[in-house]
Amino acid sequence: MRVPLSWLREYVEVAADATPDDVLASFVSVGFEEEDIHRFEVEGPVVVGQVVSFEEEPQSNGKTIRWCQVDVGEANGGVRGIVCGASNFAVGDKVVATLPGAVLPGPFPIAARKTYGHVSDGMMASARELGLGEEHNGIIVLADLGIDAPVGTDAIALLGLDDVAVEVNVTPDRGYAFSLRGIAREYSHATGAEFRDPAARDFAELAPGVGFPIVVDDQQPIRGRVGASEFVARAVRGVDPSRPTPPWMVARLTLAGMRSLGVLIDITNYVMLELGNPVHGYDLDKLSGGITVRRATSGEKIETLDGQVRTLHVEDLLITDESGPIGIAGVMGGATTEMTETTRNVLIEAATFDPTTIARSARRHKLPSEASKRFERGVDPLIPFVAARRVADLMVEFAGGTLDELGGAVFAEVFIEGIHLPAGFVAGLIGVDYTADEIVGALETIGAEVTEEGGTGWHVIPPSWRPDLTDKWTLAEEVARIHGLDRIPSVLPTPSGGRGLTLLQQGRRRVADALAAAGFVETPAFPFTTDTSNDLHGSASGEHLPSIRLANALDGQAPFLRRSLIPGLLTTAHRNISRGMVDLAIFETGTVFLPEPGVQYGTAEVPPLGARPSDEVLAQLNASIPPQHRHVAVLLTGNIIPRQPGRAAEAADLADALDAVRVIATAAGVDIDVAQGERAALHPGRTGVLSVRGEEIGYVGELHPTVAADADLPARAIVLELDLDRVLTLAGERVVVESLSAYPAATQDVSLVVPATVPAADVRAALVEGAGALLESVRLVDDYRGEGVPGDAKSLSFALRFRAPDRTLTAAEASEAKLAGVAVAAERFGATLRE
């Protein structure tokens, strides 16, 4: 809401020396957010000048200019020569003269300059050049605005260009603040200054007259609320729409963010900003009969003021006459009854409409307007009579009209339900020991009626303009706001013991941090994918498995919840590669959704809000949710080490993915074993199964070339995915860091010849089992097949490291442990030492 300060001062005392920043600070103190300060970008000298004479001079380009002599007052240099291209003025007219040194919006500095063979010592300004509107066909002639000021008078002050507006953000629950009436009241709350209510008028003068039939016929109210609870009509005859809007009104509307559209429309907009009740004007002579407020029928159409023909919905609330729809209530009027330059008689409408109805119509037709913005937040139901009379008075004053006895009204008694505010509730909720007088004073300050209830608390009736005050919590918030939010103490809560991250949360963070530290980049993706991707990546064989389909998917081509993280990584990789990022090492930790075959999910009814569901209902809700597991996945493609001086680039391969597996294993606190396997989406022979203590927990491998091609990725892309929650569960409750040994290690190597079909992981496991507790680590360093090794066999070389916790091992002890491991491998696989 933009608030011109000159307008604000009409309804509340603002100190003469208060700056815009001071005013904003006051609004902030009662809960508004400051947005900006708006000014006319005009700097003087800009004065009233009088045309003494002019000569018309045709130019070679076909344009005729006027070489004018303009008197700007002795103090401003007397008569000055000014070149002007406009022709809407005569000798003797008073105009707005911008003299050298002035700056107009743009910024556009004014200086004496040679043009069309003359030195123009200034400029005569149009409305658009001063920022007062879009009119640019001619210069401002002050007589047309009803102004007759002495020559040399400061035109900036004369036209209201010295005004300034402050802008505050109005939250949806405080619609009353979309008016000068509401915002001035809030300034009064902030400063204690006296507030003068512009709606405080004798009801006797607000009676709308008689003779104009008005009917509200709402056969299908939304949520049982009639679309129009109040509708007031007044008539003004004999208006002159060609009369100028007063400059001060144009300046205020401009600062408030609205364009001047002619005196009749300007007046309705001005009253809307002043009182907060949108007002609409109809050309009375274009109306057929009376007005009926009703819902639209299926297929009904209307041409709105923006020239668009709109097909209406049965929920739309319409303003109609005997000819049909003449407006979408609270949103936009119709073109058939629009006020134009030929309008002579006006019917003024001020109403109270159902907020839900207006909000739905505005969104349905994509017609957000200043009117709908106010109606959908709720307007004061006691203000329409005042708003209609205020518009009528201004049309009589500035448009030359006459208030007519024709009018009518439909209204209902306004009932505002009271709220019980228990004693001690405000202090207990806010944390400030407010006295009873402070509580009552704050509520009465905002306009509420407060009655004590026998020491148990108070009965509070909120003011009519505050539909947001619905319970004791909102009342407590008002008490805190009025007495200053700075009174609320800042107290850090003391957490009880045992709180913080769970063991699983800690483990997930360790794994993510470890991968990031190892050079991988985390790239979260949307959890939506296709049924085909779920089948390909969500199962080892590529068979069809059940997936959860979204009822209202964001992307119709990807309506399923993912069973795997790999599709998201493939999409991310494709997007990066298409933008030139070809070397990728990315990962994601996220949830996958694994529905069980034959189980129907999402069948439980959602319980109502406001009450905790029973244990039975909660169990039904939980049963309607598919199992959700937290996975971690990695994708590598391109070069793992870039090309650099003295070193060739190194492409990412399966070994780098296995390194990522080891990073995850170390962070999780487990040993992850790798064995050869198969998977539909991965390259045969380049796929590994990951397991912990014999339980399969994931896979690693190179994407099948056809899968990589379908994803628009390079031929070689390596992925891994594992069930992170299961890994962390298998790790146990606590990850224990081993102590550093003070004794040296004994290292030995062993090469074993085994059948080619025997997995290296199984041979490694046999060595570990046979070597016993002295074996600290074992690592496969070579897989040789060739000369010296039978064709159906392979040679596996392992690096062994032995260490004792209490002594330095001898070479004999290390050799004995090594041979014990070889013995187990020989027994199981027929392994022999390679000579």
Image (cartoon, rainbow, N blue to C red):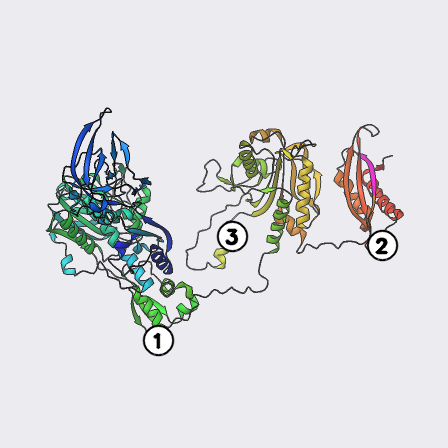
Q: Is residue 156 left or right of residue 243?
A: right
Q: Secondary structure at mark 1?
A: loop
The disc label shown at residue 622, or none: 3
Q: Is residue 578 above or below residue 632?
A: above
Give 354 or 171, whichever is nearer the viewer.
Answer: 171
Residue named by callout 1 = 455
Which residue is identified by label 2?
807
Secondary element type, mark 2: loop
Q: Nearer the viewer, residue 474 or 679?
A: 474
Judge the density around disc 3: few (<14), some (14-19), many (≥20) Cα neighbours within 10 Å: some
Cα–Cα gap, marks 3 and 2:
56 Å
User: In this rendering, which labeled residue sits more in front, label 1 or label 2?
Assistant: 2
Real-space Cα separation, disc 3 to disc 1, in angstroms? 46 Å
Residue shown at 30% from the left, 67% from the top? 444
* Residue 687 rendering spot, x and y as whole percentages: 67, 35
Q: Relative to the observer, which residue lies in front, 58 or 308? A: 58
Q: Do residues under tags 1 and 2 come within 8 Å of each other at their CB atoms?
A: no
| Residue 677 visible, this orientation | no
Say what amino acid the circle numbered 1 marks.
Answer: Gly
**Amino acid type, label 2:** Arg
Counting from the top left corner in percent of width and height, residue 735 is at 68, 54
The relative height of residue 667 versus residue 577 in the rendered view (above or below) is below
In this view, the residue farthest toward the right is: 812
Range covered by the magenta-colored residues? 748-757
Considering the numbered disc 3 on the image, is that residue within a helix, a strand or a loop? helix
